[in-house]
Amino acid sequence: MSMYALPIAHAGHWLTGLLYFAPVVVVVGALAWQSMKDRHADDEEPGDVAS
Amino acid sequence: MTSRRRRRAAVAAAAGAVALALPASASAHGIGSKQPLPLPGWLFAWAAMVVLVVSFIGLAVAWSRPRLQDVVERRRFAVPRLFEALAGGLGIAAFVAVVYAGFAGVQVETANLIPTVVYVFFWVAVPILSLLFGDVFQAVNPWRAVGRAVGWAVQRIGGPQTPAPLAYPVRLGHWPAVVGIAAFAWVELVYADRGDPSQLAIMALAYAAVQLVGMSLYGVEAWSARGDAFGVYFGLFSRMSPLHWRDRALYTRPPLSGLPSMPVEAGTVALLAVMIGTTSFDGLSQGDLWNTLAGHLQDGFTSVGLSAEHALEAAGTVGLLAMVGVVGGLYRLGIAGMRTVGRGHQSGELARSFVHSLVPIALAYVIAHYFSLLAYQGQAIAPLASDPLGHGSDLLGTADWGISYTWIGSRAISYIQVAALLIGHVAGLALAHDRALATYRRVREATRSQYWMLAVMVGFTCLGLWLLFSTV
């Protein structure tokens, strides 16, 4: 097998490995979206203070 | 929805997520580290994400004020001073016996007592014992016992003329412990002669000598609390225990509550990065990805003149440092994110303030990566203790005991690994959330600041599962 075919031959291997870290991408994306929403939210009412 | 209904919904969702995280027994078998899995290992990562997100929501809804920052401990009973002396004497005797076995025993890793004691009992069992029973190591710490005995004798002889120890330098902090733990991990994971009994005995004596010098300079307690790498290491884990030994008395407290009050010194963040990073390298080093990378690195080092053995050690050193860097970098990313919330918080202050939340993760990684070693090789303590020198003796009548590999199956071990990772990261999340409530003025700010810690926890969990179950 040529050297160039090796990465393709192992692509399934690597993709499976990436699936382990896909949840991180999902969580970071969701939290980034939520952070943007929070910044645009109207903060008129006084925030509750941790007792 | 009322707050009580929201809390019930959050608890129900968390329970459902935990159930989802466990595979059905009919479809899963033989799950273990680096073995072909009938159930995709990456599925655990997705389930872990769900568990952590649901836990985060549950904390945001049901935990709205700090609960762990100021905890009252309850005194249960005291032990006589003699007990303290006996425990220290036991520790010294055990240390001398193990070191003697390293020098005088058969120089075969599997037949000599010292490798199993050091890499299995000391490095894996003691952290778990510390979680369950508090800082048991402090009671039997051999070099601390010697230091206290010598200090007592010197005081008796010198009286008021005895010079006071030097003040422990603030800048030194936990850095000696960082170096000690990193060095031990290097020996365990990289050093070619890691199993050589006499080499281990020499290193044990050298470590003890360093401790005695440190204690003589700065005082026994000041050095033990900061410079004794293993004392600090086990002490951190013991802060999660509901049992707290202090001034020869036993106190009880809520689990995890010892962590918020842990002293954070110079080097504490680095220490936690080393603890988690080195255990991560243990997992990485067993995979095909590392085998490929190590081969390239080794070729590079041999091309500059190193021998094959030293080139491999150099490659391992690079990998070890890289994993410590990855872990430290992930934590710093989370801190950088937290800094964007609210005002007036500096990165260094936040990093030190939240570093205690990494301790459960460090223990989770230890259990996840080393539990099978303890479960199987740990049984070898019995025959080895009976024949410590490997010369055919049978001091305890257990020399012919074998290792049972069937008392716990690989599926159970995998469940324990996943459970340890999940519980450790949920505990870390709870500690960080509690600290955020005490740090930020508003509950809303505290919750938003923990978005980043959630991302860090999910990242660490996915990394841990990838290291355990991926074949890459």
Image (cartoon, coloured by chain):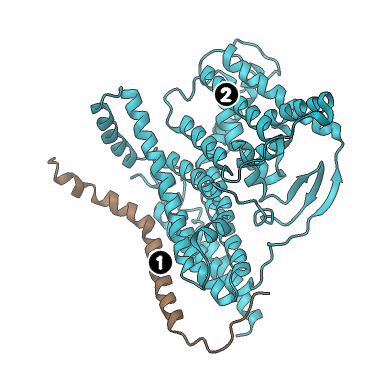
Chain colours: A brown, B cyan
Please tell me how crowded label 2 is: few (under 14), some (14-19), or many (20+) other residues with Cα within 10 Å: few
Mark 2 falls within which chain? B
Question: Which residue type does callout 1 highlight?
Answer: Val
Q: CA distance from mark 2 to mark 1?
A: 46 Å
Report the mark closest to the observer, 2 or 1. Answer: 2
Q: Amino acid at mark 2?
A: Ala
Q: Which mark is residue B206?
A: 2
Q: B439 or B255: nearer the eye?
A: B439
* x and y percentages locating residue B440 in the rendered image: 58, 71
The local secondary structure at tag 2 comes to helix
Q: Same subunit under labels 2 and 1?
A: no
- Kindly identify which chain the residue marked by label 1 belongs to: A
Which of the numbered marks, if any, corresponds to residue A28? Answer: 1
Q: Is residue B392 above or below residue B255?
A: above
Image coords of residue B40 (percent x, y) = 39, 53
Say which residue appears at 61% left-offset and 32% top-offset. Answer: B121
Q: Secondary structure at mark 1?
A: helix
Confirm whether residue B396 shows in the render.
yes
Looking at the image, can residue B35 be seen?
A: no
Vertical comparison of A37 with B177: above or below: below
**Rendered location of residue B87, percent (x, y):** 77, 31
Q: Quadrant of the N terminus of chain B?
A: bottom right
- The structure residue drawn at horizontal position 53% and vertical position 40%, both measured from the top left corner, is B178
Residue B117 location (% of width, % of height): 60, 27
